[in-house]
């Protein structure tokens, strides 16, 4: 899966559980909306035939925390056309995030989060698709 933000393409596999919300961090939060986001369904245990990706502008990016410990959370949602594979979900796949908007650079290699430099590698990710085809991808990076 890939996330494209403001014309920059980042390879990604999307997902996040809400166990560590960015809002719980100290410091000011900044929210961005409506950037292009690609949801790659190939990380699911089942995926539709053909191109397993859906592009959407139904997306948000939340940057929170103090500058020294800033984190970023991205959520993208869309309806998958012709979805008939039931409720499915995936976690623990690679999700990369362009941290420039939040003033984040990947840590020096080989630290966790630096595997896909110059993009951030999410520390939590989740992709769910309902039986009705409603997909939600969440990626969260916390240094």
Image (tube, rainbow, N blue to C red):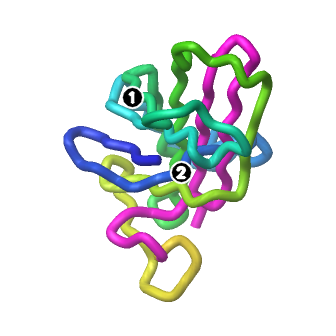
Q: Does the magenta stretch include residue 46?
A: no
Q: Name the residue under label 1.
A: 55
Residue 102 is marked as: none
Depth check, front residue: 27 or 2: 2
Q: In which quarter of the image is the C terminus?
A: bottom right
Marks 1 and 2 sit apart, C-alpha to C-alpha, by 13 Å
Q: Name the residue under label 2.
A: 13
Q: Can you name the residue that lies furthest to the bottom here?
A: 110
Find residue 40 and report its horizontal and vertical position in percent.
50, 41
Q: Quadrant of residue 128?
A: top right
Residue 68 vertical position relative to residue 32 in the rendered view, above or below: below
Secondary structure found at label 1: strand
Please report the bounds of the magenta region as a residue range.
115-143
Q: Is 128 situated left or right of 140 in this image?
A: right
The earlier-in-sequence mark between 1 and 2 is 2
Find residue 96 and report its horizontal and vertical position in percent.
47, 57
Q: Is residue 125 magenta?
A: yes
Residue beneath the point at 43% across and 36% down: 51
Residue beneath the point at 54% across and 24% down: 77
Residue beneath the point at 39% across and 34% down: 37
Depth check, front residue: 138 or 80: 80
Q: Is 46 situated left or right of 27 in this image?
A: right
Residue beneath the point at 44% across and 29% down: 54
Q: Is 5 situated left or right of 70 in this image?
A: left
Verify CB contact (< 8 Å) between mark 1 and mark 2.
Answer: no
Sort mark 1 into few (<14), some (14-19) or many (20+) by Cα contacts within 10 Å.
some
Q: Is 102 situated left or right of 85 in this image?
A: left
Q: Can you name the residue that lies furthest to the front here?
A: 49
Q: Quadrant of residue 55?
A: top left
Residue 93 vertical position relative to residue 64 in the rendered view, above or below: below
Find residue 130 and report its horizontal and vertical position in percent.
73, 20
Find residue 1 and report its horizontal and vertical position in percent.
47, 47
């Amino acid at each position: 899966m890939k996330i494209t933000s403001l014309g920059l393409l980042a390879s990604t596999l999307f997902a996040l559980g809400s166990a560590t919300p960015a809002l719980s961090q100290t410091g000011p939060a900044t929210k961005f909306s409506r950037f292009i986001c690609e949801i790659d369904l190939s990380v699911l245990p089942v995926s539709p035939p053909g191109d397993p990706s859906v592009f959407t502008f139904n997306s948000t990016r939340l940057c929170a925390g103090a500058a020294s410990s800033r984190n970023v959370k991205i959520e993208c949602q869309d309806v998958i056309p012709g979805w008939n594979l039931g409720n499915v979900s995936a976690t623990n796949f690679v999700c990369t995030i362009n941290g420039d908007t939040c003033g984040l650079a990947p840590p020096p290699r080989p630290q966790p989060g630096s595997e896909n430099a110059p993009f951030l590698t999410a520390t939590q990710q989740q992709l769910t698709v309902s039986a009705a085809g409603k997909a939600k991808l969440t990626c969260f990076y916390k240094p």
